[in-house]
């Protein structure tokens, strides 16, 4: 299922990753953007990660940045695309997570990390009959205000049938950055899109005006067995504190099922805050800066008694793996599901002359026990491929939820 209009999936991202872990750049800019609490010495000291390189490959990383910058400058001088030239260099570098965003893509990416996107406020999926249908609508968004409901089929967009198109392409058309749009072009707030819809035998066309909407990164629901499920779709701005608030508001004695399935990462500061909901200080992760090991620590006052099960899968990436690794290594949660993706690398953005941005890998982070997860992922305590949520709830019950 995609949605809402996949705000956290920038079009320029290479090799299938849904969201880069902007470890270095986020730590460097977090204070200015209000993401780092003043006076937190450990996190504040990590701002120097903006110049981070891992101890095993600093020369290569610097050479790649120089090569990208030179290629971009030469392309600009010749009247060519700096982004295209940089992308060619990055693709040859062997950097698995290296990527180049043009200005529009990077701005869209930054907005998504801030917890907002431009769209009409609906989730889409492939229905049982093979057609694309609305799976959910965002409360207060243009789609809900127009009376669109879950189960409505999307038959056309701007007068063009979408039958047979991949759901991801339909989502891109809804956002206004689909096939035929200029590279990096994204529809503006207030632009319109006409949806051809069907509900049973009734067909109609609804013209929606795109709006700036907040992503629903954290959702909370009470389970029948007295437990609370906290689903974190991505670690966007404010998501960490929403996790902490959900834990504080959970009934006394209720266990927590922390669902990180499909969580493709986000802001490291938010991941640390989320981990702090279940820890009372202590180590969350380490990383290297100029060969010197640095550390990220949980804040004080987390709930260390409440039973916790973390539900993960192959779509659990980056910052979500940081949280999973911290809770698993420190014995704070039982992990259930399938092996996580294995992206524990650090990227640093390099601005290019035309406003585009190149990102190159400069290091890796490690779990409290020293595990480097990049390319390996986290093996859950209980590996299950089917009925994972059911099994996780059983485990949580056995840990004492509802006592």
Image (cartoon, rainbow, N blue to C red):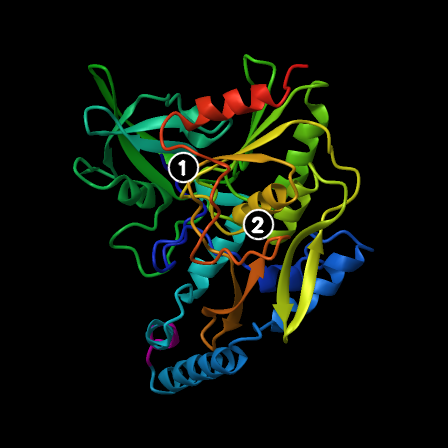
Determine which residue is flagged by label 2. 322
Badge 2 marks a residue whose secondary structure is: helix
Q: Which residue is mark 1?
A: 3
* CA distance for labels 2 and 1: 24 Å
Is residue 111 shown above or below 290? Answer: above
| Quarter residue 276 falls in | top right
Whether label 2 touches label 1, CB < 8 Å: no
- Dominant SS of magenta comes to helix
- Residue 380 - label: none
Query: Any magenta on residue 124?
Result: no
Looking at this view, is 239 or 58 the one in front?
A: 58
Point out residue 151 in the picture as x, y percentages from the top left corner: 32, 21
> Would you identify the image quadrant in which residue 217 lies?
top right
Q: Is residue 221 visible?
A: no
Can you say which quadrant of the picture contains the N terminus?
A: top left
- On the rendered structure, is 27 left or right of 160? right
Q: Position of residue 145 (x, y in %)?
A: 45, 25
In-image side of 45 versus 136 (left or right): right
Between 393 and 33, the one lying in front of the other is: 393
Q: Nearer the viewer, residue 119 or 264?
A: 264
Residue sitting at 46 percent across and 45 percent down? Answer: 189
377 relative to 295 in the view: left or right? left
Residue stretch in magenta: 80-86
């Amino acid at each position: 299922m995609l949605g809402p209009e996949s705000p956290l999936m920038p079009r320029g991202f290479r090799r299938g990753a849904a969201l880069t872990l902007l470890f270095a750049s986020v730590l460097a800019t977090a204070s200015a953007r209000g993401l780092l609490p003043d006076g937190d010495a450990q996190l504040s000291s990590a701002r120097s990660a903006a110049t981070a390189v891992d101890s095993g490959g600093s020369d290569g990383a610097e050479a790649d940045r120089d090569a990208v910058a030179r290629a971009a400058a030469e392309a600009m001088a010749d009247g060519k695309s700096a982004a295209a030239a940089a992308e060619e260099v990055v693709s040859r570098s062997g950097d698995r997570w290296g990527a180049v965003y043009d200005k529009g893509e990077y701005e869209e990416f930054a907005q998504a990390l801030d917890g907002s996107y431009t769209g009409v406020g609906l989730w889409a999926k492939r229905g049982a009959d093979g057609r694309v249908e609305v799976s959910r609508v965002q409360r207060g968004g243009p789609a809900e205000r127009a009376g669109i409901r879950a189960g409505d089929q999307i038959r056309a967009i701007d007068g063009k049938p979408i039958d047979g198109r991949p759901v991801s392409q339909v989502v891109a058309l809804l956002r206004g950055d689909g096939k035929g749009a200029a590279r990096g072009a994204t529809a503006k707030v207030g632009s319109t899109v006409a949806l051809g819809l069907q509900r049973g035998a009734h067909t109609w066309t609804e013209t929606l005006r795109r709006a700036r909407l907040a992503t629903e990164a954290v959702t909370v629901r009470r389970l029948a067995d007295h437990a609370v499920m906290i689903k974190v779709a991505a670690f966007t701005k404010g998501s960490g504190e929403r996790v902490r608030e959900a834990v504080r508001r959970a009934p006394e004695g209720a266990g927590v099922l922390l669902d990180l399935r499909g969580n493709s990462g986000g802001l490291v500061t938010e991941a640390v805050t989320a981990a702090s909901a279940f820890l009372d200080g202590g180590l969350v992760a380490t990383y290297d800066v100029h060969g010197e090991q640095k550390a990220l620590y949980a804040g004080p006052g987390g709930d260390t008694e409440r039973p916790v099960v973390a539900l993960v899968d192959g779509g659990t990436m980056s910052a979500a793996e940081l949280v999973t690794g911290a809770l698993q290594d420190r014995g704070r949660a039982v992990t259930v599901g399938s092996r996580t993706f294995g992206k524990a690398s650090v990227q640093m953005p390099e601005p290019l002359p035309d406003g585009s941005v190149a990102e190159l890998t400069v290091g890796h982070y490690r779990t409290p026990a020293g595990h480097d997860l990049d390319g390996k992922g986290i093996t859950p305590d209980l590996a299950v491929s089917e009925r994972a949520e059911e099994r996780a709830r059983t485990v949580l019950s056995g840990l004492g939820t509802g006592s």
